[in-house]
Image (spheres, rainbow, N blue to C red):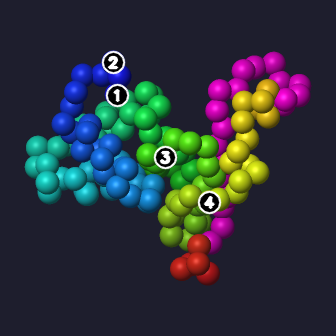
């Protein structure tokens, strides 16, 4: 968290995200940390998740369900979103996940500059089938 003032709450949020393979919402992070951190507010969670996402320490995932999910894994990888239960999970799709800067620069007929990409697959998880 270079350049950011130290925050015990931010450290707790980041540690929680690193401890789970789930892709929690801000509300889930808040609920999970509230008991150990009684002074923690939902606003603090939102602010710190935003700071961590802007700094590149976590990923903000906008999966199309109207709620942001957060992921501590910042290396390129794909996600699966269950349309039944709403769960977001990592999906190993090597050829897509390994899309690098060279590949992105080969996109034709685009006059802008691409900085990143996210790939989502949608369907039903094993539990919802």
- Magenta highlight range: 106-124
Q: Taking 58 as reference, is 45 left or right?
A: left
Q: Quadrant for residue 128, please give it.
A: bottom right
Tell me which numbered mark, 1 or 3, is placed earlier along the sequence: 1
In the drawing, what numbered circle is on residue 114?
none
Q: Position of residue 89 (x, y in %)?
A: 54, 61
Query: Is residue 79 magenta-colored?
Result: no
Q: Secondary structure at mark 1?
A: loop
Which numbered disc, 1 or 4, marks the residue that appears first in the sequence? Answer: 1
The location of residue 42, given as percent across then percent down, is 25, 44
Sequence order check, earlier mark of 4 and 3: 3
> Disc 2 marks which residue?
3
As drawn, the residue found furthest toward the right would be 109
Residue at image position (45%, 55%) is 23
- Report, in whole angstroms, how far the alpha carbon at label 1 lies from the one at label 4: 27 Å
| Residue at the disc numbered 4 | 91
- Tag 2: Cα neighbours inside 10 Å, few (<14), some, or many (≥20)? few
Any magenta on residue 115? Answer: yes
Check disc 1 and report the residue beneath it.
Answer: 1
Dot 2 or dot 3, earlier in sequence? 2
The Cα–Cα distance between marks 1 and 2, rounded to whole angstroms, is 6 Å
The earlier-in-sequence mark between 4 and 2 is: 2
Tell me whether circle 1 and circle 2 mark residues in contact (CB < 8 Å): yes
Residue hosting label 3: 73
Q: Residues within 10 Å of mark 3 (few under 14, many from 20)?
A: some
Secondary structure type for disc 3: loop
């Amino acid at each position: 968290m270079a350049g950011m003032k130290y925050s015990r709450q931010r450290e707790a949020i980041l540690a929680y995200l690193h401890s789970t393979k789930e892709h929690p919402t801000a509300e889930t992070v808040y609920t999970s940390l509230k008991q150990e951190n009684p002074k923690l507010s939902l606003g603090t969670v939102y602010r710190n998740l935003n700071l961590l996402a802007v700094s590149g320490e976590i990923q903000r995932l906008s999966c199309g369900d109207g709620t942001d999910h957060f992921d501590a894994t910042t290396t390129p990888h794909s996600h699966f979103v269950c349309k039944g239960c709403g769960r977001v999970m990592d999906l190993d799709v090597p050829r897509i996940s390994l899309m690098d800067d060279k590949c992105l620069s080969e996109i034709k007929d685009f006059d802008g500059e691409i900085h990143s990409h996210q790939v989502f697959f949608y369907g039903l998880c094993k539990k919802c089938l």
